[in-house]
Image: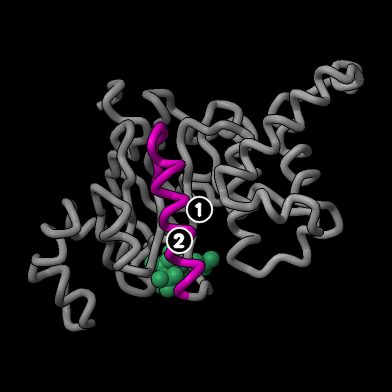
Amino acid sequence: MASGEFVLETDDLSKEFKGFFAVRGVNLRVRKGDVHALIGPNGAGKTTVFNLLTKFLTPTSGRILYKGEDITRTSPADIARKGMVRSFQISAVFPHLSLLENVRIALQRELGTSFHFWKSDASLAALNDRAEVLLDAVGLTEFRSHMAGDLPYGRKRALEIATTLALDPEMLLLDEPTAGMTHEDIVRITELIGKVAQNRTVLMVEHNLSVVSNLSNIITVLQRGEILAEGSYDEVSKMPEVISAYLGTGNG
Ligand SMILES: Nc1ncnc2c1ncn2[C@@H]1O[C@H](COP(=O)(O)OP(=O)(O)OP(=O)(O)O)[C@@H](O)[C@H]1O
């Protein structure tokens, strides 16, 4: 169904690697305003689905719709322009520039600025103000003059979120946002995602189930490339088929 209710939909999406279906017949429906998590045991196909949605991979068959529009063959850059942005991969952090400069560059990129426009002092000041607001939103104001490369890992990811937010995406795709983080960083980034999700739609692949239960209102569980279950965390975590998939004893 291509209605306004769903921001992102897949229609019988499949990806085959030399006879092996990493993703098979997936019909994903991401509702506007939801924080939707994609979970599943190792090898379930989460990363492949994510890469299909963000156009890092081409589907073997099926369609992807963004706000009702077929984007199956649209380039990642064009999709970003339509408002769907993948964090952590797209937004490069420049290690030898300060945090403020990193966010400013992202803002300039978003605006597709002509050089001349930004030559005026007023527009440069406006850019600085917006960069400060974004740094504040991710809790990095006190580090604004530090070089990005000097930041610890968790804060670097927060900076990446700030540069992603500079694009003002309607829909944010997060690929394992807490991977490799310390407990303290996880708490901080979870809070941050909760905050930035307030006026957007978020789809995230996440291994940490406590992060999933804290943040997402709907969860799709994948197993062997197919959707096994869907529902709230409370619902899916009680389903015997989900429990057995996670215990590695499920036979589908
Ligand atoms: N490029 C590829 N060529 C061949 N097989 C692949 C390729 N990419 C993924 N696969 C296979 O597809 C299946 C799904 O992989 P995928 O990485 O999507 O799973 P995942 O759910 O993200 O797993 P994990 O939790 O371990 O990251 C796996 O069996 C994997 O070996």
**Split into 4 quadrants, where in the image is the N terminus?**
top left
* Magenta part of the chain: 183-203
Q: Does residue 180 appear anywhere in the picture?
A: yes
Q: Quadrant of residue 74?
A: top right
The percent position of residue 53, horizontal first and vertical second, equals 46, 45
User: In the figure, is residue 160 to the left or right of 236?
Assistant: right
Q: Which mark is residue 47?
A: 2
Q: Is residue 79 left or right of residue 11?
A: right
The residue sitting at 32% across, 53% down in the picture is 215
Q: How is the image coloured?
A: one colour
Proximity of marks 2 and 1: CB atoms separated by less than 8 Å: yes
Could you say whether the residue bearing mark 1 is in a helix, strand or loop? helix
* Pointer 1 residue: 51
The three-letter amino acid code for the residue at tag 2 is: Thr
Towards the viewer: 46 or 195:
195
Q: Is residue 153 magenta?
A: no
Q: What secondary structure is the magenta-colored segment mainly?
A: helix
| Residue 202 falls within the magenta-colored stretch | yes
Crowding near pointer 1: few (<14 within 10 Å), some, many (20+)?
A: some
